[in-house]
Structure formats: C-alpha cells, structure tokens
Image (spheres, rainbow, N blue to C red):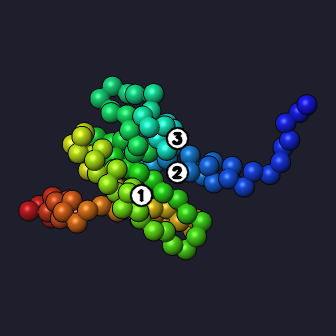
Amino acid sequence: MKKSLAFDPGARIRRAVKRQERKLADDGGGRRTPASGGLRRSKWVSPGVMPGYADANFAGSIVEAKLTTKDSISVKKEWWARLSREALMVTKLPIIQLKFSDGTTLAVMSWSDFERVRGHLEGA
C-alpha cells in the first residue's frame, strides 16, 4: 500500500527553518549544525566545532535560529540558558536570530556582550 500524500502543515515550516539555518551559516561563513533541534548532540562534527544545540557555529559565536509566521515571537529563558551554557563551554558569543516571515531579522544577545561588541566597534 502506497503512503498517502496527505497535506502536512508542518512540512512547509520545517523546510523554511532548514533554509533559514543554511542561509545563516552560509552568509556568515559558519557551519550549520544538522539536527540541532532533534538530537541532544549532533553526530556530524567538524574539526574544531563542538556539537550542540546551536543551529550555526562561527569563529567567534554560536547562533540559535528561530522563525515565525506571526507578528511577534517570545524569547524563552530556557533557549537563552541552554545557548549560553554551550557558548561558555566553547568560549563563543551566544546569539539568537529571530526571523519574521516578512524578512525582518533580529539578533538577540546579552547586554554585557552588546557592550563588549559596541566598545570594539567604537574603538574603545
């Protein structure tokens, strides 16, 4: 018996999330963490990159990507705590990327990290 090709409302979102994660890694010169949301630890490990929960790893930061089709999104403290712990283990800057369906993309980071980045940009 053939599998039904019934409409899967989550399939479109999963494809969009995967595209977001690939674009995030490709645009920033980083590496995507395959199955970061589905496995406790990814089995695909690149040299020098610790496997984990973050969706993308860069030289100085790790990024958790979130996508919404709504007009708002809540940032869960649990996301931040998990990402911060992972970033501390690999001494990288934790960032949460929030992307809305209209293309608006925001970055969330701790205030202390923001001040450090701002100081670097301003030459302080």
Q: Residue at x 45, y 68 (%)?
A: 74
| Marker disc for residue 97 | 1
**Location of mark 2 (residue):** 20
On screen, residue 87 versus residue 65, left or right, reads left
User: Dividing the image into 4 quarters, which one contains the C terminus?
Assistant: bottom left
Residue 51 drawn above or below residue 26 = above
Packing grade of label 3 (10 A; few <14, some 14-19, many >=20) is few
- Measured in 3D between alpha carbons, the distance from the residue under mark 2 to the one under mark 1, in whole angstroms, is 10 Å
**Image quadrant of residue 3?**
top right
Secondary structure beneath dot 2 equals helix
User: Dividing the image into 4 quarters, which one contains the N terminus?
Assistant: top right
Given the image, on which type of amino acid does mark 2 rest?
Answer: Gln
Q: Earlier in the sequence, mark 3 or mark 2?
A: 2
Residue 1 drawn above or below residue 66 = above
Q: In the orientation shown, which residue stands out farthest toward the left?
A: 124
Q: In the orientation shown, which residue stands out farthest toward the bottom?
A: 71
Packing grade of label 2 (10 A; few <14, some 14-19, many >=20) is some
Secondary structure beneath dot 1 equals strand
Q: Earlier in the sequence, mark 2 or mark 1?
A: 2
**Location of mark 3 (residue):** 38
On screen, residue 93 versus residue 15, left or right, reads left
On screen, residue 9 versus residue 16, left or right, reads right
- Measured in 3D between alpha carbons, the distance from the residue under mark 3 to the one under mark 2, in whole angstroms, is 16 Å
| Mark 2 and mark 1 residues within 8 Å of each other at the beta carbon | yes
Given the image, on which type of amino acid does mark 1 rest?
Answer: Gln
Is residue 112 something that shows in the picture?
Answer: yes
Residue 25 drawn above or below residue 10 = above
**Image quadrant of residue 76?**
bottom left
